[in-house]
Image (spheres, rainbow, N blue to C red):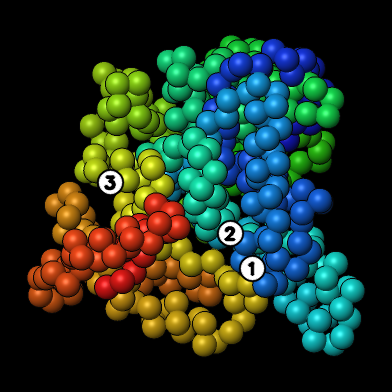
């Protein structure tokens, strides 16, 4: 999700420029993977109108991705895709989006059950409830299969891309306007292969025009406007002038003479602000931008500008994980789901494809899965920082505001003993090697499932 109102505002201010595509020839471009996949899924050429009802991976996804990659290569562009890692900021936004979609899903199912098939399909087609995180795991497998280079960032892909541009690891970065949160020079917003042009914007120009050259004010304006990192400030939803959200946020900050934190403090007792936990989420999002954690050019993982980073980075990023975990994550060998539960200390359950009306499903995620999830988190915690071994995980579902706690210390016994039966013997590997047609990635998946 781009920054709310950015395109409208930047277009009116003539800050979106167009250049010939040939300027990117023989250049390495870092591409924000989630944005790349999202645009493919919403392309009318492959969009499946009932995907919100049946879920799963679109049948034409692989062919669409390979066609798009071919376009980059034909233009002489060397793409490097960057995926999100353990990004906890914005998870609540995703849940709220699915909750808002639930009534429309129920309406579509009602139409289907009353034989209004055409209207049902049309209604399903207007919904965007695709679980992008799960599809991106599948896309990583496709990239491995087609030998397309990619990297999973330790945390925020956009922060990692900005770091790559600053260190000249890549020649340019392509993705959503949210890249402007981080210190970069220019952002490519889109590429029009048919027109052989690309559009881009300069972060410096945007700061000068929106925040009078003040970088801190610029970042706070973008946050309050609304994005994947933080919902729009509720006050901005009531705007009689109907300004673009980004412009309305800038005017609010200038008019009040306060910074973003003071504005949130002023409205902290508002019911909507409290319900969204907006003040705390704003502070965490702002600090995670100012002290984002990335992989540096020498391969070390740590906060940007380590010399000025505070001592409590773990409060908004999470405790540091072993380097092996970050490496497995970067290559797509492991996913982020359970790790994110552990590092963020929370599990947020969004409604499923039917809108979450099924009582049996509510019971499943509310109580039925608690034992296995608690055991998984307990086992994982024993191999991480001791901080995690004493930190419980909260569970919040879309059905209630109540929070349940998963006590990782409540699981009795030595959980490490469970792993004694997980060893893969040399005989298993030898048998698999004899089957020459099995690809390497399939061997890995097989080894993970045979026991």
- Please name the residue shown 54% across and 66% down the image: 350
Front position among marks 2 and 3? 3
Q: Nearer the viewer, residue 84 or 219?
A: 84
What is the spatial separation of the Cα atoms under label 2 and label 3, in whole angstroms?
A: 24 Å
- Label 2 element class: loop
Front position among marks 2 and 1? 1
Q: Residue 218, image x and y in percent?
A: 57, 23
Q: Is residue 399 above or below residue 183?
A: below
Q: Residues within 10 Å of mark 1 (few under 14, many from 20)?
A: few
Q: Do the residues labelled 2 and 1 touch (CB within 8 Å)?
A: yes
Q: Residue 204, image x and y in percent?
A: 60, 13
Residue 180 in view here? no
Q: Is residue 82 above or below residue 325?
A: above
Tag 3 residue: 325
- Please name the residue shown 49% across and 51% down the image: 141
Q: Nearer the viewer, residue 336 or 245?
A: 336
Q: Which of 185 and 149 is in front in this view?
A: 149
Residue 292 in view here? yes
Tag 2 residue: 131
Badge number at residue 55: 1
Q: Of callouts 2 and 3, which one flags the residue occurring earlier in the amino acid sequence? A: 2
């Amino acid at each position: 999700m781009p920054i709310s109102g950015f395109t409208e505002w930047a277009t009116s201010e003539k800050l979106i420029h167009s250049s010939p595509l040939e300027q990117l020839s023989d250049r390495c471009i870092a591409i924000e993977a989630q944005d790349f996949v999202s645009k493919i899924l919403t392309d009318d050429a492959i969009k499946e109108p009932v995907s919100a009802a049946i879920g799963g991976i679109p049948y034409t996804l692989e062919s669409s991705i390979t066609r798009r990659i071919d376009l980059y290569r034909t233009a002489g562009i060397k793409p490097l895709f960057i995926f999100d890692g353990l990004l906890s900021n914005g998870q609540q936004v995703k849940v709220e989006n699915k909750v808002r979609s639930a009534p429309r899903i129920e309406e579509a199912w009602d139409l289907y059950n009353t034989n209004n098939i055409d209207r049902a399909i049309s209604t399903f087609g207007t919904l965007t409830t695709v679980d992008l995180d799960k599809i991106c795991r599948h896309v990583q497998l496709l990239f491995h299969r087609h030998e397309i280079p990619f990297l999973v960032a330790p945390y925020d892909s956009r922060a990692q891309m900005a770091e790559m541009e600053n260190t000249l690891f890549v020649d340019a970065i392509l993705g959503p306007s949210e890249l402007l949160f981080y210190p970069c020079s220019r952002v490519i917003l889109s590429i029009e292969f048919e027109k052989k042009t690309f559009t881009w914007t300069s972060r410096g120009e945007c700061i000068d025009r929106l925040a009078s050259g003040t970088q801190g004010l610029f970042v706070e304006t973008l946050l309050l406007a609304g994005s994947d990192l933080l919902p729009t400030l509720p006050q901005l939803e009531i705007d009689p002038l109907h300004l673009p959200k980004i412009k309305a946020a800038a005017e609010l900050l200038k008019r009040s003479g306060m910074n973003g934190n003071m504005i949130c403090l002023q409205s902290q007792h508002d019911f909507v602000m409290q319900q969204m936990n907006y003040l705390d989420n704003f502070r965490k999002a702002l600090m995670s931008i100012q002290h984002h954690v990335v992989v540096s050019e020498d391969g070390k993982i740590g906060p940007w500008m380590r010399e000025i980073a505070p001592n409590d980075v773990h409060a908004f990023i999470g405790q540091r994980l072993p380097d092996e975990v970050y490496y497995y994550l970067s290559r797509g060998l492991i996913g982020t789901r359970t790790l994110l539960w552990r590092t963020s200390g929370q599990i947020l359950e969004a409604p499923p494809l039917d809108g979450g009306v099924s009582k049996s499903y509510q019971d499943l995620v509310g109580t039925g899965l608690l034992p296995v999830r608690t055991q998984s988190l307990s086992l994982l915690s024993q191999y991480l920082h001791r901080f995690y071994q004493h930190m419980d995980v909260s569970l919040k579902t879309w059905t209630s505001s109540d929070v349940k706690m998963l006590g990782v210390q409540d699981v009795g016994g030595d959980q490490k003993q469970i792993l004694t039966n997980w060893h893969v013997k040399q005989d298993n590997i030898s048998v698999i090697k004899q089957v020459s047609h099995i690809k390497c990635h399939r061997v890995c998946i097989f080894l993970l499932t045979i026991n």
